[in-house]
Each structure stands twice: as C-alpha cells, then as structure tokens.
Image (tube, helix red, strand yellow):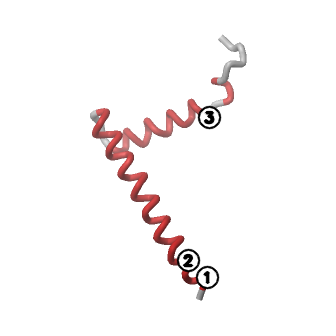
Amino acid sequence: MLASLFLGFGLIEAIIGIWAIVLFLHCLGQAQGFSAWRALGNTMLAGLVALNPASDASGWK
C-alpha cells in the first residue's frame, strides 16, 4: 500500500518536473526571441561553462 503511494507520488512529481523544464525552455526562448530548442542549447551551453573546471580562476589566460 505504502509503496504504491510512493510510486504514484513519484510519478506525479516526475511529470510536474518535466513540465517545469519544458515551460522554462519556452519562457526563455520567448524572452530571448528564439525557439525552445535553441533555449535548450543555450541552457546546456551555460551549464557547460558553469561546470567547466578550466573556467575557474586558476591563472590560465
């Protein structure tokens, strides 16, 4: 009983999470004047730049 309740709420949470990402991409694309696919690329590129260890202040110029 409890496991099926957790599974149900987990599925609902996953659906809402995916919908939030789609909505974010559409809003970003609208604000910047391009499609949601380009917004996805923009977000992925920003994530790569933010997570790139070579982009820290290590003295590389």
Q: CA distance from mark 2 to mark 1?
A: 6 Å
Q: Which mark is residue 7?
A: 2
Residue located farthest toward the top when viewing the structure as drawn: 61
Does residue 60 appear to the left or right of 32 in the view shown? Answer: right
The number of discs equals 3
Which amino acid is tagged 1? Ala
Which amino acid is tagged 3? Leu
Q: Residues within 10 Å of mark 1 (few under 14, many from 20)?
A: few
**Camera-side mark, 1 or 3:** 1
Q: CA distance from mark 1 to mark 3?
A: 36 Å
Q: Which mark is residue 15?
A: none
Q: Under tag 2, what secondary structure?
A: helix
Does residue 34 appear to the left or right of 53 in the view shown? Answer: left
Who comes first in sequence, dot 2 or dot 3?
2
Q: Are marks 2 and 1 in contact (CB under 8 Å)?
A: yes
Frontmost residue, 32 versus 13: 13
Q: Residues within 10 Å of mark 3 (few under 14, many from 20)?
A: few
Measuring 58% from the left and 32% from the top, which residue is drawn there? 50
Q: Residues within 10 Å of mark 2 (few under 14, many from 20)?
A: few
Residue located farthest toward the right when viewing the structure as drawn: 58
Q: Under tag 3, what secondary structure?
A: helix
Q: x, y (%) of residue 43? A: 46, 39
**Camera-side mark, 2 or 3:** 2
Q: Which mark is residue 3?
A: 1
Who comes first in sequence, dot 1 or dot 3?
1
Q: Which mark is residue 51?
A: 3
Q: x, y (%) of residue 36? A: 34, 44
Q: Quadrant of the N terminus?
A: bottom right
Measuring 38% from the left and 40% from the top, which residue is drawn there? 39
Q: Under tag 1, what secondary structure?
A: helix
